[in-house]
Image: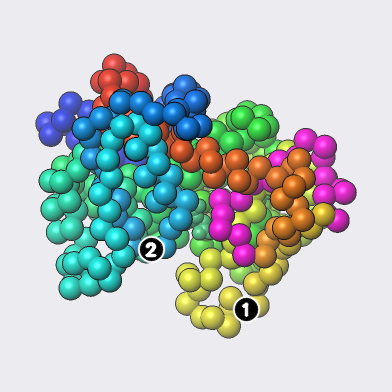
């Protein structure tokens, strides 16, 4: 079920957590992204002409910020952005609730990235327009998950996919969102991480209760020749309370051309990016590497999200 706030608009869905979406709703977003993908390849449309998107990034971003920007502009809309934290009133001590109350008077939807888990949910309580969570601390990153699912659907097979998710599973918000979504697609999930960076126990408990097939290991070799998808992640240095602890796990997994000799012919390698040292540059030209395509798919998927959230007609007619 999506969050809806009746009264302010006919339909006002926020995009806060992937757990708010059913498989049917996700499929409809992915279908809509497929319809819009030709526009992402250099086209334009007036679907969101006259609409304004506000992007508020309280943490660094390249792909998420720019692909939302590109998606909005390809659909004929415009984007306002508060720039760096230092250049905004946040540096004067303005709290998030006030920023959101103000910006929701300037825009038709707000994309928010914030270091605190739960920030997007809180923001949705103060906003008069849809809030799209672009990452809340180590919490969730639902739009990344939608583009990850779109990538798997296009480049492999989503239903019953066998996937290894590798790296920082404790702090990686893309992972937290992705595993919940994969459980809707009967996936077989192999979690590979150092012991200190295992997924939160609450998450494995939820997944086991839902009957999802899931294993945990520290050794990538155990699953490397078996899976259809390898989803690598960066160790989230900025979220470690103790830098010494980071140093003990940095560089834990690294995919090289040598590693590829042991994988299935049709394995795809994904990464939400940025990479640090998880994937050697030599792997980029292999047929397995889809991570740059994956980041491109952020544009059609975010077009679909924006068009549905801002009511291009599909939401009002049951587009969700
Ligand atoms: C991810 C994030 O911000 O969580 N980046 C992204 O949005 N593509 C992953 C990361 O920073 O490691």
252 to the left or right of 304: right
Residue 3: x and y, percent?
28, 36
Q: The C terminus lies in which quarter of the figure?
A: top left
Residue, far top: 317
In the rendered image, the vertical position of residue 126 relative to residue 302, given as above or below: below
Q: Is residue 262 magenta?
A: yes
Foreground of the two, 165 or 282? 282
**Going 56% across and 54% down the picture, which residue do you hit?**
273
State the predominant SS element of the stretch in magenta.
Answer: loop
31 to the left or right of 51: right
Looking at the rendering, the stretch of residues picked out in magenta corresponds to: 258-276
Looking at marks 1 and 2 on the same chain, the residue that comes earlier in the sequence is marked by 2
Pointer 1 local density, CA inside 10 Å: few below 14, some 14–19, many at least 20? few
Q: In the rendered image, is residue 215 in sight?
A: no
Residue 277: x and y, percent?
67, 65
* Residue at disc 1, secondary structure: helix
Q: Is residue 23 magenta?
A: no
Whether label 2 lies within 8 Å of ligand 1 gets the answer yes
* Residue at disc 2, secondary structure: loop
Residue 52: x and y, percent?
23, 40
Residue, far bottom: 244
Real-space Cα distance between discs 1 and 2? 22 Å
**Going 27% across and 53% down the picture, which residue do you hit?**
81
Q: The N terminus lies in which quarter of the figure?
A: top left
Residue corresponding to mark 1: 247
Query: Mark on residue 59?
Result: 2
Pointer 2 local density, CA inside 10 Å: few below 14, some 14–19, many at least 20? some
Which colouring convention does the figure follow?
rainbow
**Going 35% across and 48% down the picture, which residue do you hit?**
133
**Picture quadrant where residue 293 is located:** top right
303 to the left or right of 243: left
**Going 65% across and 72% down the picture, which residue do you hit?**
249
């Amino acid at each position: 079920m999506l969050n809806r706030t009746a009264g302010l608009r006919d339909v006002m869905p926020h995009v806060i957590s992937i757990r708010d979406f059913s498989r049917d709703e996700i499929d409809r977003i992915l279908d809509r992204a497929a319809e819009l993908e030709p526009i992402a390849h250099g086209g334009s449309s007036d679907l969101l002409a006259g609409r304004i998107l506000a992007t508020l990034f309280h943490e660094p971003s390249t792909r998420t910020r720019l692909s939302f920007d590109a998606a909005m502009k390809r659909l004929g809309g415009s984007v306002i952005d508060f720039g760096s934290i230092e250049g905004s009133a946040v540096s004067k001590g303005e709290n998030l609730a006030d920023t959101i109350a103000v910006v929701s008077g300037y825009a038709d939807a707000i994309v928010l990235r914030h270091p605190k888990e739960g920030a997007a949910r809180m923001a949705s309580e103060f906003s008069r327009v849809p809030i799209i969570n672009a990452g809340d601390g180590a919490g969730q990153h639902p739009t990344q998950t939608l583009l990850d699912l779109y990538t798997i659907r296009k480049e492999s097979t989503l239903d019953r996919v066998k996937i290894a998710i590798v790296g920082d599973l404790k702090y990686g918000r893309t992972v937290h969102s992705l595993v919940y979504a994969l459980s809707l697609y009967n996936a077989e999930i192999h979690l590979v991480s150092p012991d200190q960076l295992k997924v939160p126990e609450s998450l494995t408990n939820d997944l086991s209760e839902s009957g999802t097939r899931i294993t945990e290991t520290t050794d990538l070799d155990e699953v490397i020749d078996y899976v259809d998808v390898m989803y690598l992640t960066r160790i989230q240095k900025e979220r470690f309370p103790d830098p010494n602890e980071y140093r003990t796990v940095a560089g834990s997994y690294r995919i090289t051309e040598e590693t590829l000799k042991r994988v299935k012919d049709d394995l795809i390698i994904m990464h939400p990016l940025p990479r640090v040292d998880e994937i050697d540059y030599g792997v980029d030209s292999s047929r397995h590497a889809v991570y740059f395509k994956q980041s491109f798919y952020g544009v059609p998927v975010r077009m679909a999200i924006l068009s549905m959230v801002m009511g291009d007609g599909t939401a009002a007619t049951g587009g969700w």
